[in-house]
Image: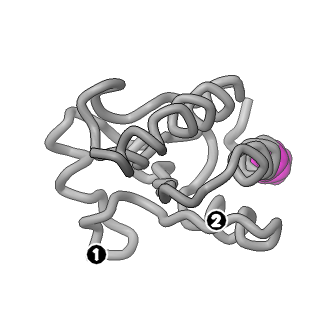
């Protein structure tokens, strides 16, 4: 409970920062979620590519969901919450620890915004 309380404000900060990027949606219930887990989908961006772009900027995340074992296929958990393609394939999961800092969250938000913009600029499908 102490660790969950420690990550709650950082999770809110991360969520708000990620959702400030156009065409990004939070997946799952905004309140009833695993402490420190923030999962979003970014329109017009593929999740694995986004994770690679984030990694090049020093930010770790995972594509899909924590239970995604079939690369390239939608995670059953994402389908169970009603997420449909293409949102299932653009999902990325960020995980915070009780030792995470505001600076790390701010870095992740900035890297996410930059990565999404760069990938959309390369996409022939993006509006």
Disc 2: which residue: 49
Q: Is residue 79 magenta?
A: no
> Of helix, strand and loop, which one carries label 2?
helix
Q: Is residue 121 magenta?
A: yes
Q: Which residues are magenta?
A: 114-122
In contact (CB < 8 Å): disc 1 and disc 2:
no
Looking at the image, is 55 positioned above or below residue 50?
Answer: below
Q: Residue furthest front?
A: 2
Q: CA distance from mark 1 to mark 2?
A: 16 Å
Q: Quadrant of residue 38?
A: top left
Q: Residue 20 got which mark?
A: none
Q: Quadrant of residue 70?
A: bottom left
Q: Residue 27 versus residue 103: which sits nearer the camera?
A: 103
Residue 39: image location, x then y, percent: 44, 44
> Of helix, strand and loop, which one carries label 1?
loop
Residue lying at 21% horizontally and 45% vertically, measured from the top left? 79
Looking at the figure, which quarter contains the C terminus? Answer: top right
Looking at the image, is 104 positioned above or below residue 126?
Answer: below
Query: Is residue 114 rendered to the left or right of residue 52?
Result: right
Residue lying at 26% horizontally and 59% vertically, measured from the top left? 75
Residue 26: image location, x then y, percent: 45, 31
Q: Residue 70 got which mark?
A: 1
Residue lying at 50% horizontally and 41% vertically, measured from the top left? 41
Q: Residue 34 versus residue 74: which sits nearer the camera?
A: 34
Looking at the figure, which quarter contains the N terminus? Answer: top left
Query: Is residue 117 rendered to the left or right of residue 13?
Result: right
Looking at the image, is 20 positioned above or below residue 2?
Answer: above
- For marks 1 and 2, the one nearer the N-term is 2
């Amino acid at each position: 409970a102490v660790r969950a309380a420690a990550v709650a404000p950082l999770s809110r900060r991360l969520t708000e920062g990620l959702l400030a990027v156009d065409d990004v949606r939070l997946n799952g219930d905004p309140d009833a979620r695993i402490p420190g887990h923030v999962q979003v989908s970014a329109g017009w961006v593929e999740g694995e590519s986004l994770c690679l772009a984030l990694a090049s900027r020093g930010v770790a995340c995972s594509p899909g969901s924590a239970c995604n074992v079939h690369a390239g296929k939608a995670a059953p958990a994402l389908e169970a919450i009603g997420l449909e393609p293409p949102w299932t394939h653009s999902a990325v999961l960020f995980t915070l620890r009780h030792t995470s800092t505001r600076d790390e969250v701010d870095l992740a938000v900035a890297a996410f915004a930059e990565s999404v913009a760069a990938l959309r600029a390369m996409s022939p499908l993006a509006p």
